[in-house]
Amino acid sequence: MFRKSLFHYAAISLIGLACGGFAVGQAAADKFKAQIDTLRKSLEKYQDYKVAVRDLYLSTVACVHYSGEKITHHMEYAKGAMGVHFVNLTVKGPPDPAKPNVLIYEPVGGKLQLVAVEWLVPLTPDTKERPTLFGQPFVGPMEGHEPLIPKEFVHYDLHAWLFKDNPLGMFASTNPNVSCDGFDFALLEKPTMMMPGP
Ligand SMILES: [Cu+2]
């Protein structure tokens, strides 16, 4: 592990010297882009929410959105929505980049449109460090999102807006272009309390 990362750094330094930092950053982004494109393809079937339900991604009903309100020691969620979370409790273990445990839908004109996926990782006594996927550090740890998830469920999470552009970035928690307006089960949530990590 140590040797490998040492080699990795050496290789990056050499390439960095050869082509400049930007090219290296670009190469890394491209590397994840291919992986993300593959992931998006593999999840396209879930654009039909019934396929998701059959695979045990179950709806939590409410369309969650945030006002952008800032509270000290709470998560900073930009004004915008997440949407309706469909959670698969049968997906367990460390976060698998190929299998998110949450799918997120936006209610649009009486239909549900797949917009994002999420990896939700509980904080346990075995947690050694903040999880990362695609070079992205997870956010948290934070309390569970009341009233849908009990406070006691302290977790990290990472959103990926694979199916709808997010001006705040592919991995931002909320998307200002997603809306719960007009949906019977819109739920304005307060930003979640942050918790100490390992
Ligand atoms: Cu969360």
Image (spheres, grey):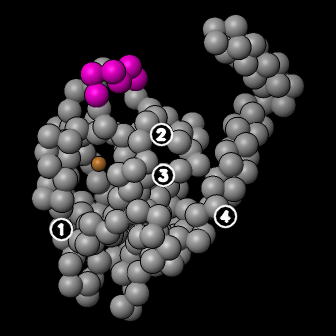
Q: Which quarter of the rendering shows the N terminus?
A: top right
Q: Where is mark 1, residue-wise?
A: 188
Q: Is mark 3 within 8 Å of ligand 1?
A: no
- Few, some or many residues within 10 Å of mark 3 (<14, 14–19, 20+): many
Residue 113: x and y, percent? 46, 78
- Please tell me which residue lies in front, 182 or 112: 112
Q: Main secondary structure of the magenta part?
A: loop
Residue 6 falls left or right of residue 145:
right
Name the spot of residue 33 as percent of width and height, x first.
69, 51
In the picture of the structure, the residue carrying the numbered disc 4 is 41
Disc 3 is placed on an element classified as loop
The alpha-carbon separation of the residues under discs 4 and 3 comes to 13 Å
Q: Taking 50 as reference, is 73 above or below it? A: above
Say what amino acid the circle numbered 3 marks.
Answer: Pro
* Labels 1 and 4: the sequence-earlier one: 4
| Amino acid type at mark 1 | Leu
Whole-Å distance between the Cαs marked 1 and 4? Answer: 31 Å
Q: Is residue 10 visible?
A: yes
Is the C-beta of the residue carrying label 1 under 8 Å from the nearest atom of ligand 1?
A: no
User: In the image, what residue type sits under mark 4?
Assistant: Lys
Disc 4 secondary structure class: helix
Disc nearer the start of the sequence (4/3): 4
Within the image, what quadrant is residue 4 found in? top right
Residue at x 35% of width, y 24% of height: 127
